[in-house]
Amino acid sequence: MSKRRKFSPEFKSQVVLQLLSGERSMAELCREHQLTSQTITTWKQQLVAAAPQAFEKGSDSSGEQERIAELERMVGKLTMELEIAKKASHLLSGMRDRNGRQR
């Protein structure tokens, strides 16, 4: 009794894309990879059924992009506040003489 072969999702999608693009025919793919046409047809159906999900993920990333933009604005604001505090500290320390007394 032979063991069943397992194929990675990347391999399956590569085979189906070769079929869909017309790069190779069903018969060529079956011979080259020692697969049945039913196996490739099943993979094709799975890929087509999952295709809308590929476009739904874009909406999730837009929420992430908004969060990243918000955090970048906060970093910019805090950087400006730090620079202002440094300048104020430098100006205030310049008002003291060498003995530490204020002028």
Image (cartoon, rainbow, N blue to C red):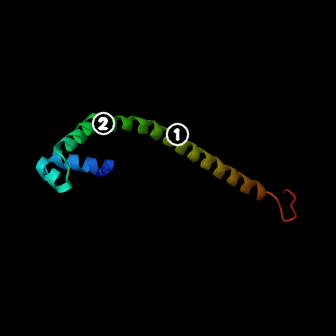
Q: Is residue 67 left or right of residue 33?
A: right
Question: Could you tell me which quadrant the C terminus lies in?
Answer: bottom right
Tell me where residue 50 appears, x and y as whole percent: 30, 36
Q: Residues within 10 Å of mark 1 (few under 14, many from 20)?
A: few
Residue at figure coordinates x 13%, y 47% from the top left: 26
Tell me where residue 9 appears, x and y as whole percent: 32, 47
Instruction: Say which quarter of the image contains residue 92.
Output: bottom right
SS for callout 2: helix
Label ID, residue 13: none
Tell me where residue 32 appears, x and y as whole percent: 17, 56
Given residues 5 and 20, the one toward you in this image is 5
- The Cα atoms of the two marked residues, 2 and 1, are separated by 32 Å
Residue 78 visible in the displayed image: yes
The residue beneath circle 1 is: 70
Residue at figure coordinates x 83%, y 62% from the top left: 97
Residue at figure coordinates x 20%, y 54% from the top left: 33
SS for callout 1: helix
Given residues 82 and 103, the one toward you in this image is 82
Q: Is residue 47 left or right of residue 88?
A: left
Residue 25 visible in the displayed image: no
Query: Which of the two discs, 2 and 1, labels the residue nearer the N terminus?
Result: 2
The residue beneath circle 2 is: 50
Q: Residues within 10 Å of mark 2 (few under 14, many from 20)?
A: few
Q: Is residue 77 left or right of residue 27?
A: right
Tell me where residue 3 appears, x and y as whole percent: 31, 51
**Picture layout, residue 24 above or below residue 67:** below
* Amino acid type assigned to the residue bearing label 2 in the image: Ala
* Amino acid type assigned to the residue bearing label 1 in the image: Glu
Residue at figure coordinates x 79%, y 57% from the top left: 95
**Picture layout, residue 56 above or below residue 34:** above
